[in-house]
Amino acid sequence: MSEPDVSTKNLEELTPREIVSRLDNYIIGQHKAKKAVAIALRNRTRRLKLPKDIREEIAPKNILMIGPTGVGKTEIARRLAKLCGAPFLKVEATKYTEVGYVGRDVESMIRDLMAVGYNVVKAEMQEQMKSSAEEKVEEALLDLLLPGSNPKQKNDIPPSEANLPAFTDVTNAHFAEQPAAPAGDMSATREKFRQMLRDGKLEEREVEVSVNRRPQGPTMEIFAGGNIEDLESTMMNLTNMISGARSKKKLVTVKEAREIIIAEQLDKMIDPDKVCDEAKRRVEQMGIIFIDEIDKIAVRGERGGGQDVSREGVQRDILPIVEGSNVNTKYGVVDTTHILFIAAGAFSVSKPSDLIPELQGRFPLRVELESLNAEDFRRILLEPKNALIKQYTELLATEGVTVKFNDDAINRMSSLAEEVNTRMENIGARRLHTIMENLLEDLSFEADAHAGETIEITADYVDEHLKDVVQDQDLSKYIL
């Protein structure tokens, strides 16, 4: 059973200890990083409880996570995004370029965050109105199945012989033709269809629906980005505004029609302005942006020309966003002063001091993540809810193959992962993906031939299938 998502409403119920506990379900070790992230997230809710004059003075303490690849930096961000109902966005620092170069400008991360916030708020409001919308959807489906049977319609059109199905065999949605019913019987017929609809007996019946293609929510974005991608999006939205709504007839099953109609009904019931206002408030007060690979835009050694100019330019462009500035989006102007920024990088070639001093100062909290050892690898294989052994066991179980790992085999894989990471490139937990894939390669390939069998993975099995890794010093083919 999957863990229930945490909405914004009960976000303040998550204490730092509870946040760390939930992250422990997926990430082994790295307690310092989890603790720092948990405190930062908790401070978001604490700040909102303060008087307005004090609240405005408290700026978020941005975090810089430093550690080798594969130790959990990005995974912490991913799980944090699922854990908190606050607007959350993960971006790669390498996809941005300095203004004047080809690529995305840094302000687009705020526009993307607002889009995330808008969609989250819209989904929440639609969920609240779903029960009332379902009543209208049921009536709309009955109108499609029995045209003219709705007493609320002024101009009732008696259903033709082809439109009025019999009730002898409804399980397979095959209906025989019946003569048109008198007007007095239409109400009873509609109620019979209503019951069959609720019982799921008409799900495969085909009906024709009109799909409206009216753009929802704000459709015009200010030309703030200056890049081709944002320009194309703006021109497309402008075209939609000019052309207006378009409808298209589509033949679908009742099951598919229900999804189409309920989406249209919910869109009509939602006020885009209210969604915009609430999304903007959440983004400004609770928004979190995770900037990965920030070490890739650090300038090493003496600053010179070429690509380094663009890298340092990206840092200068990020600086005002992190410090606090107003960014134009199609949902309105967003103030970034109280958005929390979490940056991460391996810093294997460069180091944090290679970032420009002003940007360093905007990430006052630095957390170093530790390299993984054999015991960590063992725990990663066994303990998380998405542990690799669980994943591969379930995958092969779909073929009827039962795979069991004994303790010696798990210990052998763990020590082997540590050994290879020490001798070659340290790619952290990603090494386990390579080991597991090579270990079970033959079994996965021939799984259909082993259906119904139980395969036990022992230390000898590990040594036999990974002997090239154990014996060969040239391990380049096994490096991800």
Image: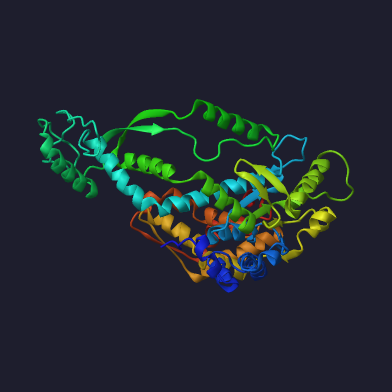
Residue 96 x, y percent position in the rendering: 71, 42
Residue 84 x, y percent position in the rendering: 55, 61
182, above or below 460, in the image? above
For the N terminus, the quadrant is bottom left
For residue 459, say whether it is visible. Answer: no
236, above or below 193, in the image? above
Question: Residue shown at 69%/39% (left/top)?
Answer: 104
For residue 197, say whether it is visible. Answer: yes
196 on left or right of 325: left
Number of marks in the image?
A: 0
Residue pushed farthest front? Answer: 154
Question: Residue shown at 10%/41% (left/top)?
Answer: 168
Residue 478 x, y percent position in the rendering: 62, 51
236 on left or right of 246: right
Residue toward you, 25 or 226? 226
Quadrant housing residue 197:
top left
Residue toward you, 184 or 299? 184
